[in-house]
Amino acid sequence: MMELNTLNTLNSSQVMLIQSFASMDKEKDREELMDVLKLFYAKKLDEEMQQLWDDGKYNQEVLDELRNQHLRA
């Protein structure tokens, strides 16, 4: 288990996730929880992107600019 000092620096959500993963005996269960978390964050990202689009901060022009950028070093 983690040291108490480390647990004190985590917020309640982080501690809950650690405890959830720690209590799982089966790898399949851990993988299923990871899938749920991935879907949760994908949904949040979609919602944020939609809000940016609705606010006019993200649009087809911005997408075109990003597509034409060469970001490789």
Image: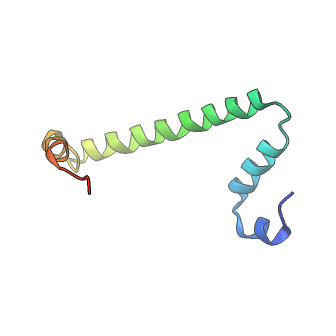
Residue visible at 47% across and 37% down?
Answer: 42
Residue visible at 32% across and 39% down?
Answer: 50
Residue visible at 33% across and 44% down?
Answer: 51
In this picture, residue 41 sits left or right of residue 36: left
In this picture, residue 61 sits left or right of residue 4: left
Placement of the N terminus among the 4 image quadrants: bottom right
The percent position of residue 29, horizontal first and vertical second, equals: 76, 30
Placement of the C terminus among the 4 image quadrants: bottom left
User: Coloured how?
Assistant: rainbow
Q: Is residue 63 above or below residue 4?
A: above
In this picture, residue 9 sits left or right of residue 38: right
The percent position of residue 27, horizontal first and vertical second, equals: 77, 31
- How many marks can you see? 0
The percent position of residue 63, horizontal first and vertical second, equals: 19, 42
The percent position of residue 54, horizontal first and vertical second, equals: 26, 42
Q: Residue furthest bottom?
A: 5
Instruction: Please tell me in which quadrant of the rendered image residue 59 appears.
Output: top left
